[in-house]
Image: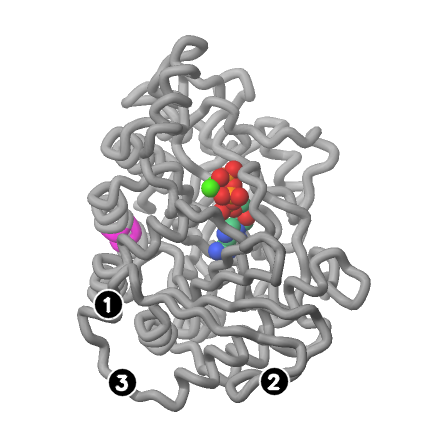
């Protein structure tokens, strides 16, 4: 199996940093594993953060190590331990996945924010470096986040497993979050989409010829819709409503729905090309045996959804211009029903809401004001959280449709 990214072994520029991170995780998970404490309101307090020194020669609490000394910080560790338990992350698996030799890979920076992403060998965990303000937002919303994910086990919001900071002596702080990798799947992901519902700048910069399984495509690249079984569809829409309401309440914006698509019959490039060639794709149901196989996978991961049909939302690229996408009643779905011939295309989808730590703060307000001089202001990614959530849900309602 092809593994994305570059393994972090000796000599890699992040080697020391990640070694510190691993030592920290081993310490934190080990320490809290032995404490079966109940969760108390005080555990959510922003002051619940603990520094630990890791001198190279070792200390009473920490092992000796090869790198220069550093300090390690845990944010709300008791809450995060309860979250891992809630999300059924076994502490030993967690530690082994992160802390082995050469088990981490650095992904070639997928986002624009300057964050670094690391993936564990087993593909289960994703580590992202975040800014101080993002940690603040996470800690601030932790009580309501905890409540939300407890209440809705099928919530699509990112599952967080850890929040930490490494500070080498005399060096800069690096803050990390550990989260689930949404695209860790039994089946290879052929296409990935990062969908926000905004059109401004929402196309991948790569040339069409370069697009492959690892390219993250965006709103304007999506030229088909996902047709779901009625029950799946309803469940999905309901959950997205709840999740958006939660995020809006926390004044969060700029999040996306990440969708990974596995096409059931391998020939995906052909299919994508045929999309561009304005042919249409229709689907059908899977045989019972495969259904059960899928249900099994479904039991181990949340929203793995069978796709009945998938068809292009826009027959032409020209129709995918920003204005078309942002009309409240854009004809995307209507367009579809007109086209009735074509190819069969079945897929399995993996999805969740990512990048949920962006507050609607002063810099976003400025970004909005600045960009709104240039284009229609509702098409910009940086808008008020309420508008953001509405536009996001409208968009989701157009790219996911009900099978009938
Ligand atoms: P920006 O703020 O510019 O959007 P960012 O650095 O905050 O970028 P994200 O939006 O969090 O980055 O993620 C960038 C890409 O990384 C996503 O489009 C997706 O492909 C991948 N990614 C992020 N989080 C996850 C996750 N939990 N599981 C799988 N893939 C992820
Ligand atoms: Ca993002
Ligand atoms: Ca971001």
Coloration of the structure image? one colour
Q: Main secondary structure of the magenta part?
A: helix
Q: Position of residue 21 (x, y in %)?
A: 58, 68
Residue situated in front as seen by the camera: 179 or 132? 132
What's the CA distance linking mark 3 and mark 1? 18 Å
Which callout, 3 or 1, points to the residue nearer the camera?
3
Q: Which residue is mark 3?
A: 37
Image: 102 above or below 136? below
First of labels 2, 1 by sequence position: 2
Let me know if residue 123 is in the magenta part. Answer: no
Label 3 vs label 2, nearer the camera: 2
Question: Does residue 357 appear left or right of residue 349 in this picture?
Answer: left
x and y percent of residue 177 in the render? 47, 59
215 is higher (above) or lower (below) than 30: above
Q: Is residue 336 above or below residue 32?
A: above
- Contact between labelled residues 2 and 3, with CB atoms less than 8 Å apart: no
Over which residues does the magenta segment extend? 235-239
User: Residue at label 1?
Assistant: 150
Helix, strand, or loop for circle 2? loop
């Amino acid at each position: 199996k092809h593994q994305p990214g570059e393994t972090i072994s000796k000599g890699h520029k992040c080697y020391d940093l990640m070694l510190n991170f691993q030592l920290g995780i081993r310490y934190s998970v080990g320490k809290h594993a032995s404490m079966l404490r109940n969760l108390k309101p005080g555990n959510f307090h922003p002051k619940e953060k603990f520094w630990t020194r890791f001198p190279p020669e070792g200390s009473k609490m920490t092992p000796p190590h090869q790198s220069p000394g550093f300090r390690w910080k845990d944010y709300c560790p008791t809450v995060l331990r309860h979250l891992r338990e809630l999300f059924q992350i076994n502490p030993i698996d967690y530690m082994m996945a992160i802390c082995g030799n050469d088990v981490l890979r650095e992904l070639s920076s997928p986002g624009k924010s300057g964050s670094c992403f690391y993936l564990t060998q087993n593909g289960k965990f994703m580590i992202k470096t975040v800014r101080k303000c993002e940690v603040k937002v996470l800690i601030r919303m932790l009580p309501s986040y905890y409540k939300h994910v407890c209440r809705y086990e099928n919530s699509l919001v990112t599952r967080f497993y850890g929040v930490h900071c490494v500070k080498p002596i005399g060096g800069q702080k690096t803050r990390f979050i550990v989260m689930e990798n949404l695209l860790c799947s039994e089946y290879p992901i052929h296409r990935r989409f990062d969908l926000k519902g905004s059109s401004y700048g929402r196309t991948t910069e790569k040339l069409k010829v370069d697009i492959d399984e690892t390219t993250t495509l965006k709103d304007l690249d999506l030229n088909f819709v996902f047709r779901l079984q009625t029950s799946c569809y309803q469940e999905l829409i309901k959950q997205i409503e709840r999740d958006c309401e939660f995020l809006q309440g926390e004044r969060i914006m700029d999040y996306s729905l990440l969708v990974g698509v596995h096409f059931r019959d391998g020939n995906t490039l052909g299919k994508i090309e045929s999309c561009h060639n304005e042919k249409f794709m229709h689907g059908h149901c899977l045989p019972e045996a495969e259904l059960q196989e899928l249900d099994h996978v479904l039991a181990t991961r949340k929203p793995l959804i069978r796709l009945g049909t998938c068809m292009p939302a826009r027959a032409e690229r020209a129709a995918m211009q920003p204005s078309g996408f942002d009309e409240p009643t854009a004809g995307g779905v209507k367009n579809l029903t007109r086209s009735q011939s074509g190819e069969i295309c079945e897929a399995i989808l993996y999805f969740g809401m990512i990048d949920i730590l962006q507050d609607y703060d002063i810099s976003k307000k400025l970004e909005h004001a600045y960009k709104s001089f240039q284009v229609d202001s509702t098409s910009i990614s940086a808008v008020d959280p309420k508008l953001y959530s509405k536009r996001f849900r409208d968009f989701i309602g157009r790219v996911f449709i009900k099978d009938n």
